[in-house]
Each structure stands twice: as C-alpha cells, then as structure tokens.
Image: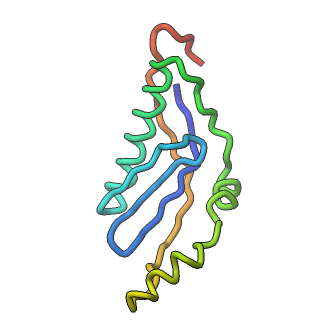
C-alpha cells in the first residue's frame, strides 16, 4: 500500500531532524540530509507497519504541506531563548523544510489491502 505524508525536516547546527505530524511519535534524526531522508522513511514505514500488525487504526495522511507549515509554526518559547542568553550563547539557527514523503507499506495478511 502506498501512502504519502507531510514531513517536517529541520536542520540544526549539529544535525537534521524530522517528524511526521499525522503520525504522533514518528521522529528521526540524521547527521546528513541524505541520511535524514532515509531515516525518516524507514521510521515511517516501521511505525505504520507496527501499528497495522498490532491492529491499531491506520493514521490517515491528512496534512498538506500548508497544514504542516501551520502546525509547525509555533514560535520558540521565550524561556527557551532566554536559557541560551544565560550561557552567553546565541539561540540555535534552525532551517525548516516541508516535503511530502511517499512510502510503501506491507499490509498484514489479516488485513484487506487498500
């Protein structure tokens, strides 16, 4: 079964991170952009297949890129920014990218294919 989910990718000074807003708990990190893209695909496939095997409902891909941007655009809380100032460090720069990621998921034999 093929599914496409909106994914939020972030580049920080030290690595990359990604999460899937439609699939709570599906996150990953990587040292490089290519590694991050592979890791979030792997995490997403693993997460969905495990949910299906456990009989949990499939988290339907509902968010568009615009929805993901709106979901993600919460400002960084002031207390977090202030904690960096306490140590004389600038707040980290985070670059964010939003993409649709398509995956192919194996459907357990006990479930009908979509």
66 displayed left or right of 54: right
Give x and y (percent) for residue 88. Answer: 39, 92
25 displayed left or right of 74: left
40 displayed left or right of 114: left
Give x and y (percent) for residue 34. Answer: 34, 57
Q: Nearer the viewer, residue 93 or 64?
A: 93
**Residue at (48% x, 31% y) in the render:** 48
Give x and y (percent) for residue 103. Answer: 48, 37
111 displayed left or right of 87: right
**Residue at (49% x, 7% y) in the render:** 110
- Tell me where residue 4 sits by quadrant: top right
Q: Nearer the viewer, residue 21 or 4?
A: 21
Q: Nearer the viewer, residue 105 or 52?
A: 52
The residue at the far top in this view is 110
- Tell me where residue 43 sits by quadrant: top left
**Residue at (59% x, 24% y) in the render:** 57
Above or below, 41 against 52 in this view is below
Q: Quadrant of the C terminus?
A: top right
Above or below, 71 against 110 in this view is below
Please count the marks in the image. 0
């Amino acid at each position: 079964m093929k599914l496409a989910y909106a994914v939020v990718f972030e580049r920080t000074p030290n690595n990359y991170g990604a999460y899937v807003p439609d699939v709570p708990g599906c996150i990953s990190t990587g040292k490089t952009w290519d590694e991050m893209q592979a890791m979030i695909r792997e995490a997403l496939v693993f997460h969905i297949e495990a949910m299906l095997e456990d009989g949990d409902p499939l988290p339907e891909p509902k968010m568009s890129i615009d929805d993901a941007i709106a979901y993600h655009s919460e400002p960084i809380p002031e207390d977090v920014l202030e904690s960096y100032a306490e140590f004389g460090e600038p707040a980290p720069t985070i670059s964010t990218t939003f993409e649709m990621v398509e995956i192919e998921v194996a459907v357990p034999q006990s479930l009908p294919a979509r």
